Image: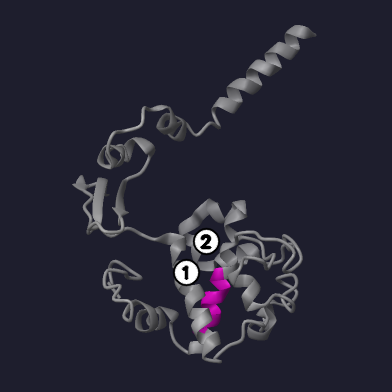
Amino acid sequence: MLNIFRIILLLGTLFSLTKVPWPIVKAWAKPLPKTVQEQVNDALDYGFDGMIVYIDKKGKPPVFYSGGYKDRDKKIPADPKSLFKIASISKLYVAVSIAKLANNKRLSLESTLADYFPELVGRIENAEKITLKLMVQHRSGIPNFTNNPAFWENEQENSKKALDFALDLPASFKPDKKYEYSNTNYLLLRRILDKVLGYNHHLYIKEEILKPLNLNNTFFHLKKLI
């Protein structure tokens, strides 16, 4: 019996080792580099294709550091002007757009998901109680479509119908009772923006946020360079 327990313990230990994030462990175990550039040079060892580090200290000119590649396939090194996808940082632009439109009385933060999409009542639990404010704050309880394993079976194709992977599921919690990051919140907020504006919210963000702030190197699509 003792031998069986030891074997189970050994197998459990070996299995747990397969779940260890070894690149992170390696990064922590290595001696601290003497310079920022040395750290950035190790970008590829940490599993990154490339990275840019920007440091702005008061009273000193800003400094850029780059490492890895901006095009790994063609082995083109990254540089301070390289463009990278900002992924979920785009949620900040959506949140600001919602706030600006609320300030201009074009929408209300207290309006509910059901107000904009009555067809989702019964398909997203608590749709009549979930306000735009709660969605912006990730306090809606709407399930995160990227947490649905079926979504990842064919991410590229399923991204076209992402909302389907959050429908008809139980709420993660009652509105405003907890916080949980959910991509579904912002997928719906983007659709609400399009509905309120009457045109693609990308154009609104460009005209009302990017241009006024002189964010001339921020785009929605690299191919279109909107």
| In front of the other: 83 or 213 | 213
* Residue 37 in which image quadrant: top left
Q: Which residue is mark 1?
A: 92
**Percent position of residue 224, x then y:** 28, 72
Q: Secondary structure at mark 1?
A: helix
Q: Which of the colour schemes (rainbow, by chain, secondary structure, one colour) is used?
A: one colour
Q: Look at the magenta stretch and give its main secondary structure.
A: helix
Q: Is residue 192 magenta?
A: yes
Question: In what element is the residue under mark 2?
Answer: helix
Residue 142 in view (yes/no): yes
Numbered badge on residue 158: 2
Given the image, on which type of amino acid does mark 1 rest? Leu
Examine the structure image and report whether residue 223 is included in the region drawn in magenta. Answer: no
Quadrant, the C terminus: bottom left
Question: Residue shown at 50%/54% (left/top)?
Answer: 154
**Residue 90: x %, y % from top left:** 44, 67
Q: Residue 84 sits in which quadrant?
A: bottom left
Residue density around tag 2, few if under 14, some if 14–19, many if 20 or more, within 10 Å: some
Numbered range of the magenta stretch: 186-194
Residue 92: x and y, percent? 47, 69
Q: Is residue 198 left or right of residue 81?
A: right
For image coordinates 43% across by 82% down, the residue present is: 200
